[in-house]
Amino acid sequence: MSISEKLVIVKVVHPYSPVNNDELKLGKGDIITVTQKEDGGWWEGTLNGRTGWFPSNYVIEELSPIIPHSPFLLSDCSSSSVQGQHLKSSTTGRKVVAVAAHSIGSSSLLSEEQLKYRRMVLQDLIQSEEIFINELQDLWDNYLIHLPKIGILTTAESNILAGNFLDIIHLHSTLLLQPLRAEDIKPLKEQRIGRLFLDVAPKLETMGRSYCENHPKSCSDFGEA
């Protein structure tokens, strides 16, 4: 199964306690995004941001939509599509798995269970963004900002190393996390986040490229020093 072509969603009907570290703990009613099917009764999937193996006879298939190729997470409810994507942050290597519920023309056609699943995905995105931002802020507050003070780097060298680090934190906080929180407090059928990612994607790309391109300059300057 190719995850870029077909998305399989399953619902847990029997709880399961993992025996090995690479297995998922299942609770009745949990929703799992299947990432790989293997013969022998074990499938790989993602649950609450964690990927692992689980027994396939403990679940039933819920949704199996066709997914268009797209760099974004969720479509607006007004579009007749279902989108899923693994996002990987170039800064921390974290992964956020987001899956849109099945939408056909209007959010009014979504079942209550599908709407609740959309809310769960949105809350997972918010939590992941909060963790990501906190990690960046902690790195700045507890390490980067102190380098000139303790004499490891000059202020100029520290600025080169940091690059647009603070701008990245600000962008994620104001243009992504805050709007996601604003959507989360809306009624389920009024939530729209596809346009949010479409709008912020070019800014994220530009800022991320600028940060990465700064690294060779940092290495070169420190090597000469």
Image (cartoon, grey):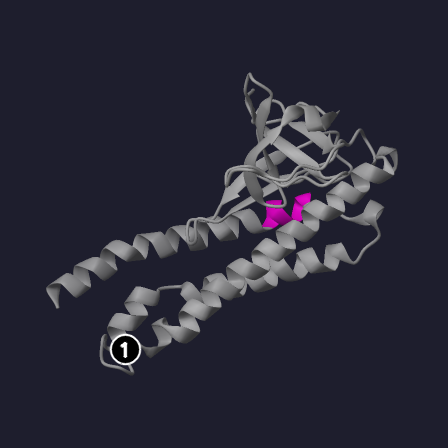
Q: Residue furthest top?
A: 39
Residue in view at x 75 percent, y 41 percent:
117
- Name the spot of residue 224 as percent of width and height, x first: 11, 64
Q: With respect to residue 110, does 176 lie above or below?
A: below
State the residue position of label 1: 155
Q: With respect to residue 24, does 201 lie above or below?
A: below
Q: Is residue 43 left or right of residue 90?
A: right
**Quadrant hosting residue 25:** top right
Identity of the amino acid at label 1?
A: Thr
Q: Is residue 136 magenta?
A: no
- Residue closest to the eye, 155 or 140: 140
Quadrant in which the C terminus appears = bottom left
- Residue closest to the eye, 116 or 89: 116
Magenta segment boundaries in residue numbering: 194-199
SS at badge 1: helix
Quadrant in which the N terminus appears = top right
- Residue closest to the eye, 107 or 34: 34
Residue in view at x 22 percent, y 80 percent:
151
- Name the spot of residue 78 as percent of width and height, x first: 78, 37
Q: Is residue 67 visible?
A: no
Residue in view at x 29 percent, y 67 percent:
160
Q: Is residue 224 visible?
A: yes
Q: Is residue 54 left or right of residue 214?
A: right
Q: With respect to residue 37, does 92 lie above or below?
A: below
Q: Residue furthest left?
A: 224
